[in-house]
Amino acid sequence: MTHTRESAHVPAFWTAAYGTHHAPTVRLVARCLLRVRAFVRELALADHVGSGGY
């Protein structure tokens, strides 16, 4: 699993993903979007590290 940094924090998605006032489906989709965003960010950063980032 990728490591999420503080800069990967997206307030709108975070609130929807972990807030209690949203439907379970909305929370699931928001959590998936947060994971995808974190993965894409880590992948982009890995291109700029000599060892591949891992």
Image: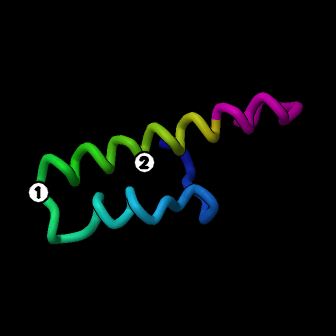
Q: Which residue is mark 1?
A: 23
Residue at figure coordinates x 33%, y 42% from the top left: 32
Q: Is residue 46 left or right of residue 49?
A: left
Instruction: Tell me the amino acid under the disc marked 1.
Output: Ala
As helix, strand or loop, the secondary structure at mark 2 comes to helix
Residue at figure coordinates x 63%, y 61% from the top left: 7
Q: Quadrant of residue 51?
A: top right
Relative to 10, say whether 30 is above or below.
above
Q: Is residue 42 left or right of residue 10?
A: right
Residue 42: image x %, image y %? Answer: 64, 40
Residue at figure coordinates x 48%, y 42% from the top left: 1
Question: Is residue 47 part of the magenta span, yes or no?
Answer: yes
Q: Quadrant of residue 44?
A: top right
Residue range highlighted in magenta: 43-54
Earlier in the chain: of badge 1 and badge 2, it is: 1
Instruction: Tell me the amino acid under the disc marked 2.
Output: Leu
Query: If the image is split into quadrants, where does the C terminus sit?
Result: top right
Residue 45: image x %, image y %? Answer: 74, 38
Q: Is residue 9 left or right of residue 47?
A: left
Residue at figure coordinates x 29%, y 60% from the top left: 16
Relative to 38, say whether 53 is above or below.
above
Q: Is residue 52 left or right of residue 2?
A: right
Mark 1 nearby-residue class (10 Å; few <14, some 14–19, many ≥20)? few
Question: Is residue 31 part of the magenta span, yes or no?
Answer: no
Mark 2 nearby-residue class (10 Å; few <14, some 14–19, many ≥20)? some
| Number of marks | 2
Q: Quadrant of residue 18?
A: bottom left
Relative to 51, say whether 2 is above or below.
below
Residue 33 numbered mark, or none: none
Q: Which residue is mark 2?
A: 34
Q: CA distance from mark 1 to mark 2?
A: 17 Å
